Amino acid sequence: MDAHEKKHCEAGTVVSMRHTGSYDEIGKVYHELYQWAREKNVEVEGRGRTIFLDPPSEFDPQSSVFEVCLPVAKGTAGDEKVDVKELPACTIASFVVKGPYSEIPAHYAEAVAWLSAEGWEIAGPPSEVYVKRPDEHGHGDPNEFVTEIQFPIRD
């Protein structure tokens, strides 16, 4: 894990799909959400984010509850398959990880320990923002992927 940083995240509108399953299924859910956006002519306005709804201490990479999100314009309409919601502005602790997605879950314990040592209180579910990811066809060198793990924290 590389950089540890405290920063502010702006509020934003996202389309999202909630899923219960393996961490390895995140890509499949993103594929479905991107396909939905294309079919509805919804323009994605930034990087994808996965919000993990299980507490970090209870996270199980084989069976977790998560929500994949894509930033979109305010006023975008969802449907029975996709929700639209406003993510609130917040202060986060950011941890940057380079490498395959399969290695990311192991970094959560390290991040939680670091937050505790710094005295920073977690204020919501963690998320991952995919900075350098596979291309639209799922191709790319997993050793070059860059993921930002974010924990909302109390100011």
Image (spheres, rainbow, N blue to C red):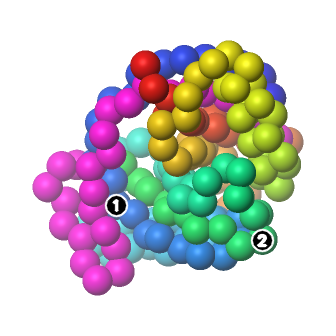
Question: Which residue is rendered at x = 71% and y = 73% of the image?
Answer: 63
Question: Dividing the picture into quarters, in which one does residue 65 lie?
Answer: bottom right
Q: Is residue 24 left or right of residue 50?
A: right
Give residue 32's position: percent from left, percent from top: 50, 74
Residue that sits furthest to the left in the current view: 75
Question: Quick check: can you spot residue 114?
Answer: yes
Question: Which residue is rendered at x = 67% and y = 26% of the image?
Answer: 115
Give residue 45's position: percent from left, percent from top: 35, 45
Task: Judge whether residue 76 is colored magenta.
Answer: yes
Task: Judge whether residue 44 is colored magenta.
Answer: no
Question: Dividing the picture into quarters, in which one does residue 83 lie?
Answer: bottom left
Q: Secondary structure at mark 1?
A: strand
Type of amino acid under label 2: Gln
Q: Mark 2, residues whose alpha carbon is within 10 Å: few (<14), some, or many (≥20)?
A: few
Q: Is residue 106 left or right of residue 122?
A: right
Q: Mark 1, residues whose alpha carbon is within 10 Å: few (<14), some, or many (≥20)?
A: many
Question: Which residue is rendered at x = 27% and y = 62% of the image?
Answer: 84
Type of amino acid under label 1: Val
Residue 16 versus residue 22 in the image, above or below: above
Counting the numbered discs, the total is: 2
Question: Quick check: can you spot residue 100?
Answer: no
Q: Is residue 122 left or right of residue 106?
A: left
Please give the residue where the numbered disc 1 appears in the rendered image: 15
Residue 143 versus residue 1 in the image, above or below: below
Q: Nearer the viewer, residue 154 or 26?
A: 154
Please give the residue where the numbered disc 2 appears in the rendered image: 62
Question: Which residue is rendered at x = 41% and y = 42% of the image?
Answer: 46
Q: Is residue 45 left or right of residue 23?
A: left
Q: Considering the image in quadrants, where does the C terminus appear?
A: top left
Q: CA distance from mark 2 to mark 1?
A: 24 Å
Image: magenta residue range? 72-99
